[in-house]
Image: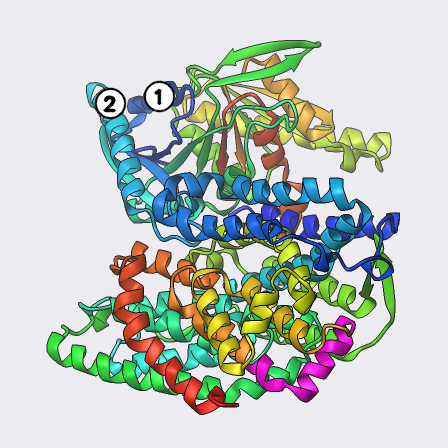
């Protein structure tokens, strides 16, 4: 593994920010101008739709082409929106593009990068025998870790030990599917570190610990899934009568790279600090961002780099660590974030925007839960969260500036944010493309020889039969008629 | 040191087969088997964004590589060398080191990259990392290398690489090991050049008397090396220079028509090696000759 590539990637992110601070502003804040969300036509959302369709369809229809050209495709859709946008709206469009890059994209990628780097430096060793009890315990541990080290980090940490523990079992497919449900998705619901949509909410002003409000929802879903899993695993275990693992080759349980747990705590601290401190604002290319957010970004880069430098390379190698997934996310999300600008602006314009029909038809918490969920199942859940977060703001506080609108929404209508948050996080598990770690887990499991269901097989055999009934129960308990 | 079993890692770049044929010269001193290794980088078949693992692509690559290797196996068989094919998916250096350990090979041979105008190095960071971590000798092969001399671009074909090896010594333990390795080339090397450079960093703070003294001591040590080679029945000559070590040693290798450079891996700690680059790594990067690093 080339260490310089990792560091260069981190430095690249810094390089994006520093010149901007140095050269200052040449953009026009829309606060001084018309609200372009009110005049943007619906078709300006087409590049966003195609960007998301590309993510949904290319891996299915042309995986080889997609593997080699996904970056170009992402930049193509971004350019298709940005170039005409800049030509027509000039300074305002530039401001919106820089705003989404500086406020959303860069912090988002830096957080994912740091969590990914640090969790990749932790190696779980040991011969575990995959019995129903052991497997359920591993799923519980992973689910609990996911909210603190990110669903991606927890999934990457746990998947290989989980697969190794079950290498003697015949039917492993359902185990990996439940692993995706719990560790790669539902487990991330408790903090903004857990799942990218929640971090985007945090970046927009949702308090760090507000997400604990959805702990009851998460406990219900995780509890039900774990019970179902335990019964399924017990059933298969009894039928399979697996031959015992050769204990002559028993590897004692151990953790390497333990210092990375401290670095995860440092990441939590840095994110918390940025939510608590108020050190004023600076203007970067005319986009106002808070000093504490910049400090957080710097700290996260330092923590990630410190982890890379202090972790033995053999830990990364034994983890089969690769930068590819995070680089892919960085490439794809620049396309997603830029193309989604018109969509967000129109939704923010509320009933004055071209998406007024959505604003008007999505009224109740149950609507928000399901519409956020259905979109999150097939589109990545982070942009979906942001889209419906803005829909809620457009519905209830369209006349307020964003920070005041969020405070108002949380104080007066928190159930809407609960519905959007749980919809985005939980439904990310519904397909391989709902959340980034899903495809990583699938890839690792397939490489290790565990057959995984096809895209539609996953939905039909597992999502429709297991997840959807659980979510219907969540709907009745938490959102119906409220 | 033995050269019975070799791990030959390839990416099928230009002249890889010629480089392999060069290595078969080692039959004269006991080469029996070559383990042919091709590592499919995991990222090229796994982690399709939002997709899965491309098993079919992996099998397709394995088939193509296997077909190519069949030709190599025939070439080796005609020369009386056994061979084994290993094609694996993973992180290249980890896989190479793991196969080397499992197969108990005596030496790892890996090809260089094409020197670019921008980087001007023959060896990439992957190979340097492998050299840094390998517990066994590693030969960085450079069959065809371009370099500048007096403003002119010269293309050098590195043939008969074991004919006139140059030992660049710093008197360290790994240098001693390198000398032992060279002794085991008896019968293959017509002459060995033993070179030492008194580094600029050492001499710059010295008085003329001290410099004279260190030169005398260095000559004495060179003679000792020469005597050991003579005792082993190998012809040798020595070279003592002073100045900046890397360019001086490369200069000596050119002046003496060396066919390869053999060095002990310098024992700096990981961080200094990474950031500053050890002498051995700098020479591996910048010399147009194949470089054999002995841990």
Q: Nearer the viewer, residue A395 or A121?
A: A395
Q: Is residue A70 left or right of residue A337?
A: left
Crowd rating for badge 2 (residues with CA inside 10 Å; few <14, some 14–19, many 20+): few
A278 magenta-colored? no
**What residue would you read off at disc 1?**
B17
**Is residue A266 at all visible to an observer of this figure?**
no
**Mark drawn on residue B71:** 2
Look at 62% across and 10% down and name the residue there.
B153
Q: Is residue A409 magenta?
A: yes
- Residue A147 placement, left or right of B65: right
Task: Give me the residue at 23% from left, 35% from top.
Answer: B84
Residue A153, image x, y percentages: 50, 67
**Which chain letter goes with mark 1?**
B
Q: Quadrant of residue B184?
A: top left
Q: Can residue A24 be seen?
A: yes
Residues tagged by mark 1 and mark 2 found on one chain of the structure:
yes
Is A71 drawn above or below residue A10 in the view shown? above
Boundaries of the magenta span = A400-418
């Amino acid at each position: 593994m080339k260490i310089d590539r990792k560091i260069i990637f981190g430095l690249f992110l810094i390089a994006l920010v520093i010149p901007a601070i140095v050269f200052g502003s040449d953009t026009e804040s829309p606060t001084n101008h018309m609200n372009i969300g009110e005049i943007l036509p619906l078709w300006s959302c087409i590049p966003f739709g195609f960007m998301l369709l590309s993510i949904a369809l290319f891996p299915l229809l042309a995986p080889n082409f997609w593997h080699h050209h996904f970056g170009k495709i992402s930049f193509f859709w971004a350019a298709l929106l940005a170039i005409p946008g800049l030509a027509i709206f000039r300074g305002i469009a530039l401001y919106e593009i820089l705003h989404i890059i500086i406020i959303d994209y860069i912090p988002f990628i830096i957080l994912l990068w740091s969590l990914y780097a640090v969790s990749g430096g932790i190696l779980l060793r040991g011969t575990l025998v995959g019995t129903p009890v052991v497997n359920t315990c591993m799923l519980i541990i992973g689910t609990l870790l996911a909210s603190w080290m990110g669903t991606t980090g927890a999934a990457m940490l746990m998947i290989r030990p989980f697969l190794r523990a079950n290498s003697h079992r015949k039917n492993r497919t359902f185990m990996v599917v439940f692993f995706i449900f719990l560790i790669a998705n539902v487990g991330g619901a408790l903090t903004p570190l857990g799942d990218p949509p929640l971090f985007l909410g945090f970046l927009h002003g949702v308090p760090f610990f507000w997400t604990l409000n959805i702990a009851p929802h998460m406990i219900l879903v995780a509890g039900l899934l774990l019970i179902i899993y335990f019964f399924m695993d017990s059933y298969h275990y009894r039928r399979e009568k697996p031959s015992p693992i050769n204990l002559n080759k028993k590897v004692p349980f151990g953790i390497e790279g333990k210092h990375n747990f401290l670095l995860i705590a440092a990441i939590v601290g840095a994110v918390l600090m940025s939510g608590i401190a108020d050190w004023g604002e600076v203007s970067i290319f005319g986009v106002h961002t808070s000093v504490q957010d910049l400090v957080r970004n710097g700290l996260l880069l330092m923590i990630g780099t410190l982890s890379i430098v202090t972790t033995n390379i053999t830990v990364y190698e034994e983890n089969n660590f690769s930068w590819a997934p995070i680089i892919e996310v960085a490439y794809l999300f620049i396309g997603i974030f830029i193309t989604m600008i018109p969509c967000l602006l129109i939704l923010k314009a509320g009933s004055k925007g071209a998406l007024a029909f959505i604003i008007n038809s999505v009224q109740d918490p149950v609507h928000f839960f399901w519409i956020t969920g259905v979109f999150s199942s097939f589109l990545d859940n982070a942009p979906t969260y942001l889209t419906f977060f803005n829909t809620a703001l457009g519905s209830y506080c369209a006349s307020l500036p964003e920070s005041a609108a969020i405070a108002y929404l949380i104080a007066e209508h928190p159930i809407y944010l609960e519905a959007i948050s749980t919809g985005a996080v939980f439904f990310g598990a519904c397909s391989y493309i709902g959340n980034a770690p899903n495809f990583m887990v699938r890839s690792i499991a397939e490489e290790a020889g565990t057959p995984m269901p096809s895209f539609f097989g996953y939905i039909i055999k597992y999502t429709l039969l297991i997840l959807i009934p659980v979510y219907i129960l969540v709907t009745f308990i938490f959102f119906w008629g409220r | 040191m033995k050269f019975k079993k070799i791990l030959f890692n390839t990416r099928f770049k230009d002249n890889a087969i010629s480089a392999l044929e060069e290595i078969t010269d080692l039959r004269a001193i006991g080469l029996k088997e070559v383990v042919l290794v091709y590592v499919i980088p995991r990222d090229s078949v796994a982690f399709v964004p939002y997709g899965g693992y491309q098993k079919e692509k992996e099998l397709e690559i394995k088939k193509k590589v296997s077909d190519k290797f069949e030709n190599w196996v025939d070439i080796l068989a005609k020369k009386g060398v056994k061979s084994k094919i290993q094609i694996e998916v993973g992180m290249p250096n980890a896989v190479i080191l793991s196969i080397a350990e499992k197969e108990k090979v005596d030496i790892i041979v890996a090809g260089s990259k094409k020197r670019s105008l921008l980087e001007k190095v023959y060896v990439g960071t992957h190979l340097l990392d492998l050299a840094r971590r390998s517990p066994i000798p590693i030969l960085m092969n450079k069959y065809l290398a371009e370099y500048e001399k007096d403003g002119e671009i010269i293309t050098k074909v590195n043939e008969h690489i074991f004919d006139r090896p140059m030992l660049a010594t710093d008197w360290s333990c790994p240098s001693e090991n390198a000398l032992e390795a060279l002794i085991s080339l008896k019968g293959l090397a017509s002459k060995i050049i033993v070179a030492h450079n008194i580094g600029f960093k050492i001499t710059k703070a010295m008085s003329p008397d001290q410099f004279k003294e260190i030169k005398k001591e260095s000559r004495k040590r060179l003679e000792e090396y020469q005597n050991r080679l003579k005792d082993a029945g190998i012809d040798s000559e020595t070279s003592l220079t002073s100045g900046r070590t890397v360019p001086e040693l490369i200069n000596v290798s050119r002046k003496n028509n060396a066919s390869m450079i053999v060095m002990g891996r310098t024992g700096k700690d990981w961080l200094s090696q990474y950031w500053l680059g050890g002498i051995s790594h700098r020479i591996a990067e910048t010399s147009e000759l194949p470089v054999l690093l002995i841990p």
